[in-house]
Amino acid sequence: MDKEIKFSWQDIIKYGVIGGIVALYVVLIGMVVTFKERYIIAETVNLGQIALFSPTFILAYFAANNARKLKSLIYAIVVGALVGAIVGVFVAALLVLASHVNMREVFLNVSPELLKILHFGQESLKGASLVIVGLNLIVGLVGGLFALAPRRWSNALLVGAALVTLMGILQELMSITFGTKDWYKPLGEFIYAKKGLSWGGTILFFVLGMLFSLWRSSPGLHPGARVAKLPPKQQQGVRIVSFLLGLAILVWLPKFLGSYPSEILTTVGIYVIMGLGLNIVVGFAGLLDLGYVAFFAIGAYTVGILTTTGKLATVGWNFWMALPVAIFLATMAGVILGIPVLKMRGDYLAIVTLGFGEIIRILVLSDWLKPYIGGAQGILQIPKPEILGYEFKGPQQIYYLVLIGILLVGYIAWRLRDARVGRAWKAMREDEDVAEAMGIHLVSTKLMAFATGAAFAGLSGAIFAAKLGSIFPHSFNLIVSINVLSLIIVGGIGSLPGVVVGALILVGLPELLREFADYRMLFYGALLVAMMLVKPEGFVPEKTHARELREQPLEPEVAPEAPAREAL
Amino acid sequence: MTLLQLDNLHTYYGNIHALKGISITVEQGEIVTLIGANGAGKSTTLKTISGLLYPRQGKVYLEGKDLTKYRAHEIVKMGVIHVPEGRRVFSRLTVMENLEMGAFTRKDKDGIQKDLRRVFELFPRLEERRNQVAGTLSGGEQQMLAMGRALMSQPRILLLDEPSMGLAPVLVDLIFDTIRELNEQGMTILLVEQNALLALDIAHRGYVLETGRIVLEGDAKALKENPQVKEAYLGGS
């Protein structure tokens, strides 16, 4: 079974060439120049450099991945360094080529500035090439050593480095948060230098990240394992306390973060509600629904029509009167979609639901309905919700509306999962025919899934309309359905905490990285691909799905299988 | 006493006339077997009884009650339990979870516990592997699990579809011994098998199906001696 592990020139060259191509790509799309001013650590390390050297590090790590099994220091060093050097040769070759030939006609980003950066302060081309190869060699060597380190420690180092990078990238946002407030202002000044993290901040976050990772991975300290050892009564207590503590933090958060991050959190929250709904349909019941945005649109438009005070004004209800109607209509739409697709499975179901989503989007855009719902101009002047004189006017207030929505919907989803209908969904997801033979009523079970999922999306849409104060058809594109589906998959299909993690990563991160404009989608795509390769079961996997994707050793057969006829 | 009676059943797959007037009776406490070649309509008969297919004509009676008026999930509640062919277990769930699914229609916790113990007595291997994922069980164990799961839903009659399919001879014997044991405990069983010899060995009565029609019926011993049956299904004499 185990392949013999040996030193292989072929592998080294393969990984080196891949790393070289990726590094060239990073250089040629202009990341190194664009990000040269984005200092992560106090005017020392910038994001462009990180982008330039990460391929080297990652490929060297993968190339030397066998070092852990071999326990060979020399193997790790040699393989890592060689891969690094090959990558370096690629980059140096680009530098040499670009210094002699004008490449700008094809590659716009090969600017004099880039060449200057790639010289790394050296005067001569020769010296610069040597420095490039040397630096890559060192980075590759470190990558190789990483592959040798025990997994726990290498993970901890990576988490630390990732946290430092993230905090460095988020400097602008965090400075606003820290800068405007009273008692944590000194803290902000300690963490951040003028550009990037201060050395103190760097060390702080690195150590924090490492400690967190080590704490999570330590068998003796792991929070879940320790709680599980306590008597049931205390376990209950720990859970209640940690829930209340978490809630308190969540309630306090928008006050601390300020307006813009609260806005992002609100958007994330709206996706969490949708994700919890689609998770019931896709994760619990196994019905692939690609038209999920339709129910979100129905919720949003119902609230819009019923509450607007603009020129499309109808009854002019307040938000709280319109909300139940929005949820009801979305639920009905769920049932109406559910009935024709009862007999469909898998791909066919996906296509039909896709069509349903498009129908709703086109209806919303249509001239036919324009007098009622505004067509492409949408619905304006949707009043903010108000309760007992408290107005949910800005993101910092709407946040609480979203939070309540998530808690409510999360609780319902959690209870449904463990209820009879949850078990019926599970059986249906695993095998429809057998589920039916077990006495599960497929029609009502499916409709229940569609209806519940749609109701959640309706609630989400209603809050979305109130948050924006105006709604336009282009907010209800197919991409919303795809995003919600992706966030469920990234978080861990069928898993409730997974929805939150997935939404934070797939909705929150791109919002935070808005300043990186076009490169944002590159990160996003790379993250999705890496994620599916490294952790296909998601960040917080649900146990049944994890079983499928993690390889399970097959039990030996009791006796060799043979066709029954041979028994005769 | 007649437990199950099929009266002139006609079932279609689209335009294909699969069952052309099947009439069968199963008495309380009997093992009745349906034998026949591939495509004779054996599995279709079971699916029609359990409500997975609707007959275009004819009735199915369970103690005089017409089952064709009910849907599959209601028929399960009446105690007609179908074990589909090809060991259809929930392969990503554990053995325990599979068995719990079998008790889906029930709410009597004590009764469920009692039946669970009974299943584990019948199939001790399942108890050993209660926390194992069903997909990683061997073929024979999966068949045991499929039967155990059926027993969890308080059957009055078990419809077994090809329990020997794809199993090694040793395991086939084990499964058939269990079927006999279940019957001795009072379970009524309608058994569909391609392995006619084995089926007729443990059954009381049998029916021979050919292209959707019953061509022979009678006492299992008599069928086994029948030259036609010997010729066609028992590999000659």
Image (cartoon, rainbow, N blue to C red):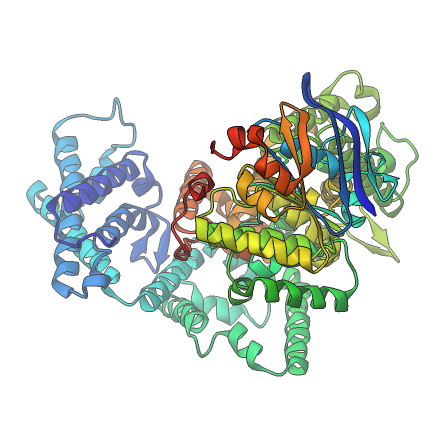
Position above or below: A497 against A290? below
Left or right: A292 as drawn, with respect to A174: right
Residue A142: give x, y in percent of width and height: 21, 59
Q: In this orientation, which residue lies closer to the viewer: A417 or A565? A: A565
Q: Is residue A568 above or below residue B37?
A: below
From what the image shows, is residue A212 above or below residue A393? below
Please state, as top left, top right, bottom left or bottom right, where the C terminus of chain A lies in the image.
Answer: top left
User: Residue at coordinates 11% horizontally, 29% vertically from top-left?
Assistant: A100
Tell me where residue B209 sits by quadrant.
top right
Q: Residue furthest right?
A: A315
Q: Position of residue B91 (x, y in %)?
A: 53, 50
Whether residue A68 sits left or right of residue A422 in the image: it is: left
* Foreground of the two, A323 or A551: A551
Residue A253 versus residue A89 in the image, above or below:
below
* Camera sees residue B5: yes
- State the image quarter where residue A242 is shown: bottom right
Observer able to see residue A495: no
B185 vs A316, nearest the viewer? B185
